[in-house]
Image (tube, rainbow, N blue to C red):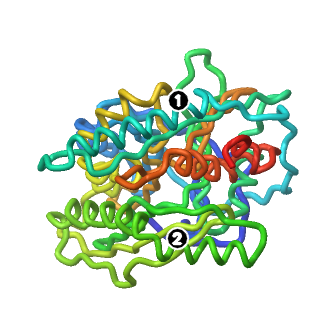
Amino acid sequence: MNFSLFDGRGSTVAADAGHFAFSGPSGHIRATGAPVAIARGSIDSLETRLEGAFADCGPEAIIGGAMPFHRQDHDYLWLSPRCTGVFQTVERSPAEAVADHARADPPVEIYTNAVITALRQMERERDLPEGLKKIVLARSLKVRTQDPISLDGLMARLADDPTTTAFRVALPDPGNRPRALIGASPELLLEKRGNHICSYPLAGSARRLPDTVEDADACARLASSEKDRREHAIVVEYILDTLAPFCDQLACPDGTRLTCTRSMWHLGTRITGQVKDRDMPAALLAAHLHPTPAVCGSPRDRADELIRHLEPVPRGFYAGAVGWSAKNGDGAWHVAIRCADICGCDARLFAGAGIIPGSDPMAEAVETGSKFAALLRALGMPASAALAGLE
């Protein structure tokens, strides 16, 4: 694939974003032509399905789409005969008018009770070799607008934050209505170019504040938080252990640093390496990593089991992976966070927080509320709408 298509900067998201589109710090890419849906399946069959889809395609073909959170669930991927990184410029539209409030679904009390249950479970399993060490619990908001939400306009507004990767992926809808997963992820799961790979996990977060002094204090508290450092270390160790068998070189050249979006501070560690097999598709490497402890927990299978039990709303594609892979194996996949499932006038927003021993249930609820900020602003609502009654 010609990566000059992926390196354009400064343009905005196209009005015709198609079946999948991504816009972020590395540039912009979207499907063009007539994308074809790939047979759906779980991660276990991904390699076979990728090989079959690419078998009769030209060198410019790419596959893009979304992997669900649960590895056993079916993905939704599209094969595009070609792609472009030259997005048409569209006029920035103001945020749309929406309902005057966002409704927690389920109520926040259900979430805090789930956190309490998880903490008790960790205490019971504390001395077990495969006992639960961390779990990420999510909750959701429901927003209903007066008019159908413009998918193009929403993604264009989310792409205004240069620290995130805005994404849009078409999803199946039984009513044959336009439905998409749209968000602005700050977290790179796996990018591959040639034999070079990069992952940039985030874990440990704090809300950004409008007052510069208070914002600096929030940053400093996160930097010195022993709880957040422990949470972050679990994620980094998992990614290093998972990628090691596929790599000749693997390192964290910058160590753990603070990074931020317009709404959140995060602890982040850039992981770089060189893979042994340069032809291995980026999607397969991403699938080996997914889901990381940043969105699931540790051990992964134990956390996944408890998430199914404690979260009343299925995650679907939230906290899954969104991205693209080229025929030559290159590509980029991002963690599907800070996102919403959009269909017509309805939007369901998701946000999660990492729970480890020492977590405070109400503080974790506040953290999730803060993570809704980017989507709420893009939908025309105040960022504080998800924090009502939590502070």
- Disc 2, SS: helix
Q: Which residue is mark 1?
A: 110
User: Tag 2: Cα neighbours inside 10 Å, few (<14), some, or many (≥20)?
Assistant: many
In the rendered image, the vertical position of residue 129 relative to residue 120, given as above or below: below
Q: In the rendering, at what x and y percent does residue 14 appear? A: 71, 53
Residue pictured at 26% horizontal, 60% vertical? 238
Q: Is residue 32 visible?
A: no
Residue type at the position of mark 1: Ile
Q: How many marks?
A: 2
At x 47% / y 67%, what residue is drawn? 2
Q: Is residue 313 left or right of residue 261?
A: left
Above or below residue 231? Residue 129 is: above
- Locate the N terminus and report the quarter of the image it occupies: bottom left
Can you identify the residue that label 2 sits on? 222
Coordinates of residue 387 in the picture (x, y in percent): 70, 46
Chain-order first, disc 2 or disc 1: 1
- Of 307 and 4, nearer the camera is 307
The residue depicted at 21 percent of the width and 59 percent of the height is 242
Picture quadrant of residue 99? top right
Location of residue 156 in the rendering, given as x and y in whole percent from the top left corner: 73, 53
Q: Amino acid at mark 2?
A: Leu
Query: Left or right: where does residue 228 sit relative to residue 248?
Result: right
Residue at the left extreme of this rendering: 129
Taking the image as shown, residue 149 lies to the left or right of residue 251, namely right
User: Splitting the image into 4 quarters, where does residue 176 fall?
Assistant: top right
